[in-house]
Amino acid sequence: MVHARQPRPARGEMTPAGQAAGTLTLRLPVQRPHAAVPVTELFLLDESEI
């Protein structure tokens, strides 16, 4: 499960500082996976379902 975190200043990242509220930031591994086609699945739920 992925949880949204509060925005923080960018430090050597490829995203601008001060993301809007509710922005989801994914931290992906730097190392290339051993899969031919890597896939990241996101399952979005309504806040009332949490």
Image (cartoon, grey):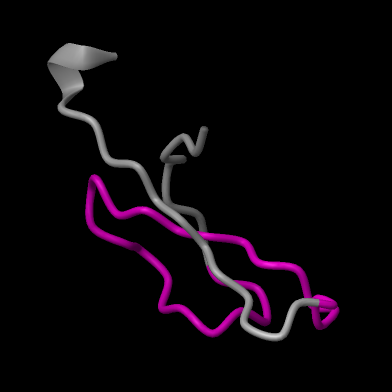
Queried whether the magenta region covers residue 40, the answer comes back as: no
**Quadrant of res 10:** bottom right
Q: Main secondary structure of the magenta part?
A: loop
Whether residue 29 sits left or right of residue 47 in the image: it is right
Vertical placement of residue 22 versus 47, above or below: below
- Which of the two residues, 9 or 13, is positioned nearer the viewer here? 13
| Magenta residues, start to end | 10-34
Whole-percent x, y for residue 11 in the image: 65, 73
- Which of the two residues, 17 or 23, is positioned nearer the viewer here? 23
Rendered residue at 23%/57% (across/down): 20
Queried whether the magenta region covers residue 29, the answer comes back as: yes
Rendered residue at 43%/42% (across/down): 6
Whole-percent x, y for residue 31 in the image: 85, 79
Vertical placement of residue 5 versus 47, above or below: below
Whole-percent x, y for residue 4 in the image: 41, 40
- Which of the two residues, 32 or 12, is positioned nearer the viewer here? 32
Rendered residue at 39%/51% (across/down): 42
- Specify the quadrant that holds the C terminus: top left
Vertical placement of residue 5 versus 35, above or below: above
Q: How many marks?
A: 0
Rendered residue at 41%/78% (across/down): 16
